[in-house]
């Protein structure tokens, strides 16, 4: 089961309309048989990613940064769990960025982000990211339009630096509709074990949905580059979302083509049986 991810990629400079993108798209894979096949395929993809991650870690020359952004209830946590939960935790780091601390506010807005980027050999996953500073900050007017405008250039330069230094950057928006989000909120309120995920303030942010969509569109238009592309992944069918993200990570690592390093000794001089 190979998906065509190209329609989900935002080309540099592409004017994007999220209204024209179907958040429930499954590329025609809609019946139960395909859904079950997708779940089995996800296991295969995760196993392949695990092997590629081991090579990445062993090689120690390149890193991969995966940025996940979405509206509340968009599925960031479950995507991370399904796609990255089966990998060796030695080589994967997941960071969640919430409201900046007092110390973080005493520095430039990229300071807290840069120190969490993956080192060589690692996969880093950001649950929210530096894009909050051109999303929620722009929506609420917490920075001037002039400041926000400069930040798009800052972000592009930052991601170009990471790329030049060996860290591949892939950015994913998990795309859901306003109606789907409401359904997820309602489900959380029906399950006591999910109460902790419900925040009444999310309802206030929900009222600003159109503003958020516009800010997402601008950010992806301004900051999807060849070095750090944006992908809009339909996320309402979670099985499709998972295999789409997993295939994207797998394909990216394959293109990076990490290799096991040459041994620093001559294996022919040793035999496993002869070791004492």
Image: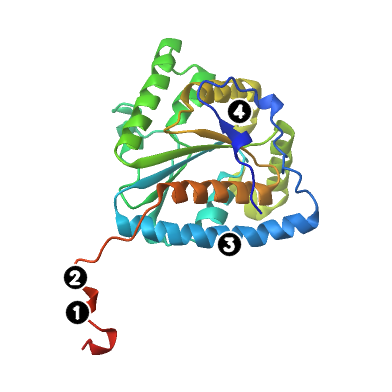
Point 72% across, 38% down: residue = 180
Residue 15: mark in rendering: none
- The answer to whether the residue labelled 3 contacts the one labelled 4, judged by CB atoms less than 8 Å apart, is no
Q: Residue at x 20, y 72 (%)?
A: 266
Looking at the image, which is closer to me, 102 or 27?
27
Real-space CA distance between mark 3 and mark 1, rounded to the nearest whole angstrom = 37 Å
Distance from disc 3 to disc 2, alpha carbons, whole Å, reads 34 Å
165 is higher (above) or lower (below) than 145: below
The image quarter containing residue 202 is top right
Give me the C-alpha separation between circle 2 and circle 1.
Answer: 8 Å
For this rendering, which residue is in front, 16 or 178? 16
Quadrant placement of the N terminus: bottom right
Quadrant location of the C terminus?
bottom left
Q: Which residue is mark 3?
A: 44
Check whether the beta carbons of the residues at disc 2 and disc 1 lie within 8 A of each other. Answer: yes
Instruction: Give the label, 4 or 1, closer to the camera.
Output: 1
Rendered view: 75 above or below 193: above
Circle nearer the N terminus (3, 1): 3
Q: Point out the tag, 4 or 1, that comes first from the N-terminus.
A: 4
Which mark is on residue 265?
Answer: 2
Question: Which mark is first along the chain, 4 or 3?
Answer: 3
Tell which circle, 3 or 2, labels the residue nearer the N-terminal end. Answer: 3
Secondary structure of the residue carrying numbered label 3: helix
**Is 29 positioned to the left or the right of 42 in the image?**
right
Q: What residue sits right under mark 1 in the picture?
A: 269
> Spatial distance from mark 4 to mark 2, Cα to Cα?
59 Å
> Residue 152 location in percent, x, y?
42, 21
Picture mark count = 4
Nearest to the eye among marks 4 and 2: give it. 2
Residue 205 tag number: 4
């Amino acid at each position: 089961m190979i998906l065509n991810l190209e329609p989900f990629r935002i080309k540099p400079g592409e004017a994007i309309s999220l209204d024209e993108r179907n958040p429930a798209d499954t590329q025609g894979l809609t019946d139960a048989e395909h859904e079950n096949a997708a779940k089995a395929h996800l296991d295969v993809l995760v196993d392949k990613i695990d092997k590629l991650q081991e090579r990445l870690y062993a090689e120690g020359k390149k890193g991969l940064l995966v940025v996940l952004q979405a509206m509340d209830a968009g599925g960031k946590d479950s995507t991370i769990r399904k796609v990255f939960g089966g990998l060796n935790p030695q080589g994967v780091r997941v960071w969640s960025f919430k409201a900046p601390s007092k110390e973080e506010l005493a520095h430039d807005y990229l300071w807290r982000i840069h120190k969490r980027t993956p080192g060589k050999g690692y996969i880093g996953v950001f649950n929210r990211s530096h894009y909050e500073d051109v999303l929620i900050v722009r929506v609420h007017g917490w920075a001037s339009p002039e400041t926000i405008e400069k930040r798009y250039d800052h972000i592009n330069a930052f991601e170009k630096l990471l790329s030049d230094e060996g860290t591949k950057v892939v950015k994913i928006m998990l795309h859901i509709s306003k109606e789907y989000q409401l359904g997820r909120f309602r489900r959380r309120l029906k399950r006591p074990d999910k109460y902790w995920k419900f925040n009444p303030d999310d309802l206030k942010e929900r009222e600003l949905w159109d503003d958020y969509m516009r800010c997402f569109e601008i950010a992806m238009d301004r900051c999807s580059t060849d070095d750090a592309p944006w992908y809009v992944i339909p996320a309402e069918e979670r099985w499709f979302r998972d295999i789409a993200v997993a295939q994207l990570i797998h394909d990216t690592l394959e293109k990076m083509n990490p290799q096991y390093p040459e041994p620093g000794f001559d294996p022919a001089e040793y035999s496993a049986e002869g070791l004492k």
